[in-house]
Image (spheres, helix red, strand yellow):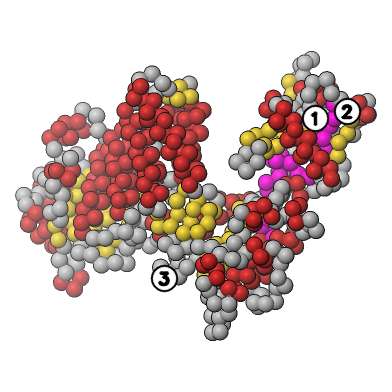
C-alpha cells in the first residue's frame, strides 16, 4: 500500500493547473458530503480493510479545463516482485445490465422517430443533463475506501488520501449502476408525461423550457384537445424529449414531467447551482424547446427532419483531413498511427449521418489492421483517395444534411436479383411496394476481364460484386426516383452480400472499388439503406439465364435481346398477360 501511495497520481495530474483543479474539486465534494480527506500518516499504520490506492488522472475536457478519471484498471508492479491487482480486476459484477444495454439504441430510436414523422409536422426538442452524475450515486458504507487516491500536490507537501463516497468514473460497474438509475428516472418521467395536462405542478426550472420563438408561435391551448406525440429518451446522463405539439401547454407538460421524474430519482438541491439538473446547460438553452437541437453529437432539424454532425466536430475533422491531404503533397510527412486510428474512428462515427461514407473506409480499415508506426498517404494513392472522399462527404453534409428517412430501412419498394458467371452478368428487377416495369438485363464481360478471371487476377466474388453493381445501375433507370426508397438486392454469392451489408471488403481491391462506387451512387440517389440478401444458387435460376445467355449454355443461348425476351416470357410468364422488358440502359461507356 505504501508503494501505491509513493507512486501517487498519474503524471497528467501533477501540472500546476491540474493540481489547482483537483484542490477546487475536492473542496466542493467535501462541502457536498461526497468525499473525505484523510492524512496518510494518520492511517498508514492501521489502514481500513478495504483501502486501495489507485492513480488519478486529469483528462482535457470540452466544457471545463479537466475531467478527473480514477484509473481503477491500474495494477501495481511491486518492487519486491508480484503484482497488486486493480480494483476493476477484483470487482465482482453485480450491476443490472438491462439499462446500459439501451445505450446503443438511443440514437437509432431518435433517428427512427424523425424518419417516421410526416413532412408537414414539426418536431420540438429539448435536453436536460445530469450534473456530476456518478458523484450522485453513493456507495455502501465502508466500501468507499476502494475508490481512494492520493490528492495531487506539489513535491514535499504532506500526503492526503481522498476517499470519495460516490461512484467514480473509471470503475467498471459505475456506468451500469448509473444507467439503471437514469433509465428509472426516464420511466418515472414518462409516467408523469402520461398524466392529464395541468396535473403536474410547474417545475422550478420551467422558465428554461419556454421562450423559443417557435414555442411562442404555438397557441396556448388546444381547444380541440388533440392528442400529441412525444418520445422521451436518455443516454447515460443526457435526457432528450421530442414532441409534436399542438399547444404551448403540451410542451410545458412534457418539460415539467421530465424534470419532476428526474428529481424523483436524483433529489433536487435547494441550491440551483448544485442541482442534479445542470442549471448551466439550461442557461445555454439546452432545455428550451426548439426546432433545431444538438443531440448526442448530431444536429437535428425538426422541420426538415435532417441530421448532420455537429458543427464543432465537423469543422475539427475537416481541418485535420485537410492537413493530412496537404502534407501528403509535400512528400515526406507521415501521420502517427494513434492519430490516424483515432481520427478514422471519429470519421466512422460521423458517417452515422452519411452511411454511404462507410463505403470509402476499406483502405483505412486495412491500415488499422496492419498497425504501422506511421501512415504515409503519399505512398498509398488508394488510401489518399479515400481520405479525400471522406472529407468531401463531410464538407457537403453541412450544405446538404441527410434526411433521417435516408438512414432507416424497411420493407422493399423494389427488388433486384442478380447472378454472374465467367461469361457475363444478368438480373431481374420488379416492384414490391411500388410499381415498376418487370425488367431483365444482361451484360457480357469484355475479353480482358475474362482473361483476368482465367488467370485468377479476378475472383468469382469480384464478378458477382460487379454484377450487383450493374444491377443497381439498371435499377436507377428502371425504378426512376429512388430517393428515400427501400431496395432489396439478392445475390447467391455470400461474400458479395457481406460486403454490401458492411459497405466494406477485407481483401479484394477490385471489390473495394466497386463498393466505393455503389456507396457513392446510394448517396447521390438519397436511397434508404439497401437490404442485401442471400439466395441459394439452386433457387436463383431466373438470373442464371441472362448471365449465361452468351453461349456457355446452349439451351439459353440468346443472340439478341429479342431472343432473351422470348425465352424469358416463355420460361417465366407473368400474370395478367404482362410481359418482361429487356433493359437497354447499360452501355459500354456507363460501365467504364
Q: Mark 1 points at which residue?
A: 150
Image location (x, y in percent) of residue 73 = 69, 32
Which quarter shows the C terminus?
top left
- Residue at position x 48%, y 47% in the image: 311
Q: Mark 2 points at which residue?
A: 40
Residue segment shown in magenta: 159-185
Q: Mark 3 points at which residue?
A: 120
Image check: 576 left or right of 339? left
Which quarter shows the N terminus?
top right
Badge 3 marks a residue whose secondary structure is loop
Give neighbour class at mark 2: few <14, some 14-19, many 20+ (Cα, 10 Å): some
User: Which one is earlier in the sequence, the residue at label 2 or at label 3?
Assistant: 2
Give neighbour class at mark 1: few <14, some 14-19, many 20+ (Cα, 10 Å): many
Please check the rendered image and state whether residue 167 is part of the magenta-colored stretch, yes or no: yes
> How far apart are the alpha carbons under marks 3 and 1?
58 Å
Do the residues bearing badges 2 and 1 touch, measured as CB atoms within 8 Å? Answer: yes
| Residue 160 visible in image | yes
> How far apart are the alpha carbons under marks 2 and 3?
66 Å
- Residue at position x 43%, y 38% in the image: 318
Count numbered badges in the picture: 3
Image location (x, y in percent) of residue 483 = 32, 59
Amino acid at each position: 500500500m505504501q508503494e501505491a501511495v509513493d507512486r501517487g497520481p498519474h503524471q497528467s495530474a501533477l501540472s500546476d493547473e491540474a493540481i489547482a483543479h483537483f484542490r477546487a474539486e475536492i473542496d466542493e465534494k467535501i462541502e457536498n458530503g461526497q468525499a473525505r480527506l484523510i492524512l496518510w500518516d494518520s492511517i498508514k499504520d492501521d489502514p481500513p480493510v478495504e483501502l486501495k490506492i489507485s492513480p488519478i488522472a486529469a483528462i482535457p475536457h470540452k466544457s471545463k479545463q479537466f475531467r478527473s478519471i480514477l484509473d481503477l484498471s491500474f495494477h501495481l508492479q511491486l518492487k519486491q516482485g508480484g503484482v497488486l491487482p486493480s480494483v476493476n480486476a477484483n470487482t465482482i459484477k453485480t450491476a443490472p445490465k438491462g439499462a446500459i444495454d439501451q445505450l446503443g439504441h438511443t440514437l437509432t430510436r431518435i433517428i427512427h422517430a424523425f424518419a417516421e414523422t410526416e413532412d408537414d409536422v414539426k418536431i420540438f426538442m429539448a435536453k436536460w443533463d445530469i450534473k456530476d452524475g456518478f458523484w450522485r450515486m453513493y456507495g455502501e458504507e465502508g466500501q468507499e475506501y476502494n475508490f481512494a487516491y492520493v490528492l495531487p500536490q506539489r513535491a514535499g507537501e504532506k500526503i492526503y488520501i481522498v476517499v470519495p463516497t460516490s461512484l467514480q468514473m473509471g470503475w467498471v460497474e459505475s456506468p451500469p449502476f448509473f444507467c439503471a438509475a437514469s433509465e428509472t428516472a426516464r420511466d418515472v418521467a414518462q409516467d408523469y408525461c402520461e398524466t392529464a395536462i395541468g396535473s403536474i405542478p410547474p417545475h422550478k426550472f420551467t422558465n428554461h423550457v419556454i421562450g423559443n420563438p417557435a414555442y411562442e408561435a404555438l397557441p396556448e391551448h388546444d381547444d380541440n384537445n388533440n392528442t400529441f406525440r412525444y418520445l422521451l429518451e436518455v443516454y447515460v446522463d443526457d435526457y432528450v424529449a421530442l414532441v409534436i405539439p399542438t399547444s404551448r401547454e403540451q410542451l410545458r407538460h412534457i418539460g415539467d414531467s421530465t424534470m419532476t421524474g428526474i428529481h424523483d430519482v436524483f433529489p433536487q438541491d435547494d441550491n440551483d447551482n448544485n442541482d442534479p439538473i445542470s442549471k448551466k446547460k439550461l442557461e445555454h438553452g439546452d432545455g428550451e424547446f426548439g426546432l433545431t437541437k444538438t443531440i448526442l453529437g448530431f444536429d437535428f432539424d425538426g422541420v426538415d427532419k435532417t441530421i448532420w454532425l455537429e458543427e464543432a466536430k465537423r469543422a475539427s475533422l475537416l481541418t485535420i483531413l485537410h492537413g493530412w491531404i496537404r502534407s501528403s503533397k509535400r512528400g515526406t510527412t507521415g501521420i502517427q498511427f494513434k492519430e490516424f486510428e483515432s481520427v478514422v474512428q471519429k470519421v466512422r462515427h460521423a458517417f452515422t449521418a452519411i452511411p454511404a461514407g462507410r463505403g470509402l473506409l476499406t483502405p483505412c480499415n486495412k491500415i488499422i489492421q496492419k498497425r504501422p508506426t506511421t501512415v504515409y498517404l503519399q505512398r498509398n494513392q488508394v488510401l489518399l483517395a479515400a481520405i479525400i472522399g471522406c472529407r468531401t462527404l463531410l464538407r457537403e453534409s453541412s450544405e446538404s444534411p441527410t434526411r433521417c428517412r435516408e438512414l432507416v430501412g424497411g420493407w422493399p419498394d423494389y427488388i433486384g436479383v442478380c447472378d454472374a458467371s465467367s461469361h457475363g452478368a444478368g438480373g431481374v428487377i420488379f416492384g414490391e411496394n411500388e410499381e415498376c416495369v418487370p425488367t431483365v438485363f444482361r451484360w457480357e464481360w469484355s475479353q480482358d476481364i475474362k482473361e483476368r478471371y482465367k488467370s485468377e487476377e479476378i475472383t468469382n466474388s469480384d464478378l458477382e460484386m460487379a454484377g450487383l453493381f450493374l444491377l443497381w445501375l439498371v435499377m436507377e433507370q428502371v425504378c426512376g426516383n429512388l430517393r428515400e426508397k427501400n431496395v432489396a438486392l439478392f445475390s447467391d454469392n455470400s461474400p458479395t452480400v457481406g460486403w454490401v451489408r458492411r459497405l466494406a471488403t477485407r481483401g479484394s481491391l477490385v471489390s473495394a472499388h466497386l463498393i466505393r462506387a455503389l456507396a457513392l451512387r446510394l448517396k447521390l440517389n438519397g436511397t434508404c439503406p439497401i437490404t442485401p440478401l442471400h439466395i441459394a444458387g439452386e433457387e436463383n435460376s431466373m438470373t442464371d439465364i441472362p448471365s449465361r445467355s452468351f453461349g456457355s449454355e446452349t439451351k439459353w443461348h440468346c443472340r439478341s435481346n429479342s431472343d432473351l425476351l422470348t425465352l424469358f416470357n416463355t420460361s417465366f410468364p407473368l400474370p395478367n398477360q404482362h410481359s418482361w422488358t429487356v433493359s437497354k440502359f447499360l452501355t459500354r461507356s456507363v460501365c467504364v
